[in-house]
Image (cartoon, grey):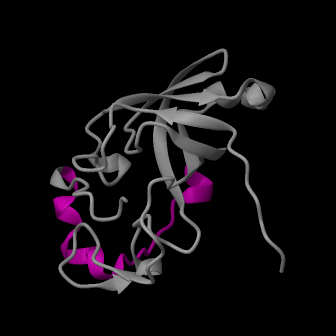
């Protein structure tokens, strides 16, 4: 298979200019608000997106350290395989966040529960649809006994250059 190239469709803006202290998931963002600036040529693609309360942002971890196939997760005390955690230093530095869509003004999406660094390149947007995205009988692996810490967990800078 040949090289795969993605081009950003926009830039994510938040109050988080440094990794350290940034929430590690939208659930821990405490209502932090931000904006997504969609590049003008992609604005027609926003048609009807305002009918959804939540959206999934797919982005590039542009400040991630080099790839590592094992890492110590934020809420863990043991190294795990990179595919068993959500850390950014992965073979393809792609991240996802499900955020609340507050509104759209021209090419600007106003969002809440943002856990993404200022200036992060946006690759795509998908509407969050509970019937598509929620699952029952879910297992959460090693996080089972750690998930209660999510509200106080923040980035400590370990994955950023």
Identify the main secondary structure in magenta: helix
List the single residue furthest toward the top.
105
Residue 79 is inside the magenta segment: no
- What residue is drawn where x is 27% and y is 77%? 72
Which quadrant of the figure has residue 2? bottom right
Magenta-tinted stretch: 130-151
- What residue is drawn where x is 79% and y is 71%? 3
> Residue 49 placed where, x, y %?
67, 30
**21 on left or right of 9:** left
> Residue 107 placed where, x, y %?
66, 21
How many marks the image carries: the answer is 0
- What residue is drawn where x is 41% and y is 44%? 116
Q: Can you see residue 127?
A: no
Q: Is residue 53 above or below residue 73?
A: above
**74 on left or right of 109:** left
List the single residue furthest toward the front.
161
> Residue 114 placed where, x, y %?
39, 39
Which quadrant of the figure has residue 125? top right
**13 on left or right of 19:** right
Q: Nearer the viewer, residue 30 or 14?
A: 14
The quadrant the N terminus occupies is bottom right
Q: Is residue 10 above or below residue 160?
A: above
């Amino acid at each position: 298979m040949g090289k795969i190239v993605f081009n950003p469709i926009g830039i994510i803006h938040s109050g988080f200019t440094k990794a350290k202290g940034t929430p590690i998931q939208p659930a821990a963002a405490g209502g932090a608000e931000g904006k997504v600036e969609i590049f003008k040529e992609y604005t027609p693609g926003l048609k009807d997106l305002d009918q959804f309360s939540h959206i999934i942002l797919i982005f590039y971890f542009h400040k991630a350290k080099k790839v590592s196939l094992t890492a110590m997760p934020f809420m863990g005390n043991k190294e795990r395989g990179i595919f068993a955690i959500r850390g950014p230093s992965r073979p393809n530095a792609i991240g996802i966040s499900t955020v609340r869509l507050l509104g759209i003004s021209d090419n600007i999406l106003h969002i809440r529960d943002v856990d993404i660094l200022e200036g992060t390149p946006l690759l795509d947007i998908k509407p969050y649809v509970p019937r598509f995205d929620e699952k029952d009988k879910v297992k959460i692996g090693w996080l089972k006994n750690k998930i209660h810490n999510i509200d106080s967990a923040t980035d400590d800078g370990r994955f950023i250059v």
